Amino acid sequence: MTACAIEPSAADEDDSVPVAGCTITVDGAYAARLAQQDGSCFPERWTLDGPEPYAVPLPGNQPEEPDTEVQPLRDGRVLIRRLVDGRHHFALLYPTGPGTGELPLGAVECPDEVTSLRLLPPAPGGARAYGLAVGPRSSTVWLVAGGSFGPEPLAVVPGRCSGGVWLDRSGRMLALDRELGGLTKAVVVDLERGGEVSPLLQIAPDSDDRLLIADPDSGLILVGSDAPCPGQERLGWGVLGSTLPVRFPESLRMPQVPDCTVTPFAIQPGQMLTPESCGVALWIEGPLGRWVGAWRPGDRRMCHLPAPEGWLTGAGVWTRDGVLRLPYSTGEVPCGVAAVVVPWGETGGSGEAGRTGEFAGFGGTGDAGPGCPVRDGRAAGAPGASGQPAEPDPAARAGDSPAPVVARPVPLQQAPLGRPLRPTPQGRPAEPVSWERPVRWVRLERRFQPPSQGQTLERSSLELPLRQGPPEPLVTN
């Protein structure tokens, strides 16, 4: 997930100034950022899949501008976007002995000053890179690297788009947050069908619904919507292809810390058919500082962890066996990766306070506060790394499951809410939902008339098979 960072340079902490931009490939092999030293910006590539991480500076013939974007590809080359005289120039950088090689790819010219262009998050596979040009009335998805003839437009989407989340492992289905008619709704763009656009999120007719992050393996998604609390965005979760509505648990809120923002940046991959066991990493920032939150839908509580010293804020990847890798840079360690073992259910991470919904992680014996470095690569109070992946669902072990494909979540107003509630296991209290009268959603569902063919309920030809076993019900007070 692409994120901005304000961190020291990998070369010298004393001479550094704020730097921006840090992206990691989907497989976690490479990262790239725009570092600074002595007031000059230069691209820097990090290799993360070796015995030890190391950084390679890729300076050009002249310093880069602060708004320059960089993105690593799977072959180790770094894509760079430069804005020169209203034209966005793209090139591939690679080390050549003591110097830096550069392969120009072409340029995209914006028709007016209102139109802006930025790179989309790294695509699955890592062989291609995409950009999004946002104009006053429409947005264009560009293939800027990996094509045959330089940058080429792939899709034109009416409205102003933002975000950018990949829904499959082939790099075909791209989700964008489109602002149209005063509302923001997430839509899906099919890049292999001429940029066909279809709705993705429709939680309420007058709500702003954005897709923040998605995992193609399990189908787990996290969304931001103001449907439960009009005028205030809440974090919720759902599953692609599920018939249950999006849920907004209290464990994803931070009511005890005012003016605190919670942003998901990584999801644990490889949890096929078990979205409830996927770990989600969140960047939490507020008046008390910044730290890392770890959350799983099945646990119903947040585990608060200290961020490593010098963390490239908002950057990180999960491994399949559940280890969170966070890149950081300090004066002593110019290029480092902290391997954080999340203490799920341990008192060092969330404790009894986390079980009752209280905020943990600030003060007290055994609880490290935000900003405390992870010295040994693990979270404070975390047990040793087991290296064992999460236990798969018994139904998934019964036979081979079909290959994962893309499906769309059913909107809240169209999802059946009359299913019987599953008894809550002893020792884990049911978590209350955020709104007081959930029955109003039931009435909305009863009045709903099925749309005509081609609308939200129409399934795509690429569908994710439903998870085996009964899904977790929507628990109400």
Image: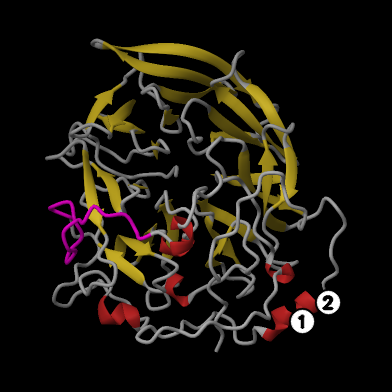
Residue 24 in the figure: left or right of residue 309? right
Is residue 270 or residue 75 the one in the foreground? 270
At 35% from the left and 60% from the top, the residue drawn is: 391
In the rendered image, which residue does mark 1 sit on? 443
Secondary element under disc 1, as helix, strand or loop, is helix
At 74% from the left and 47% from the top, the residue drawn is: 198
In the rendered image, which residue does mark 2 sit on? 447
Q: Is residue 307 magenta?
A: no
Q: Is residue 460 above or below residue 335?
A: below
| Amino acid marked by disc 1 | Arg
| Relative image position of residue 41 (x, y in whole percent) | 33, 28
Q: Main secondary structure of the magenta part?
A: loop
| Relative image position of residue 187 (x, y in whole percent) | 68, 49
Quadrant in which residue 149 is drawn: top right
Is residue 157 or residue 260 the one in the foreground? 157
| Part of the protein shown in magenta | 374-391
Q: Is residue 355 above or below residue 372?
A: below
| Amino acid marked by disc 2 | Arg
| Relative image position of residue 235 (x, y in whole percent) | 52, 66
| Residues at circles 2 and 1 in contact by the CB criterion of under 8 Å | yes
Quadrant in which residue 95 is drawn: top left
Is residue 12 or residue 152 the one in the foreground? 152
Q: How many marks?
A: 2
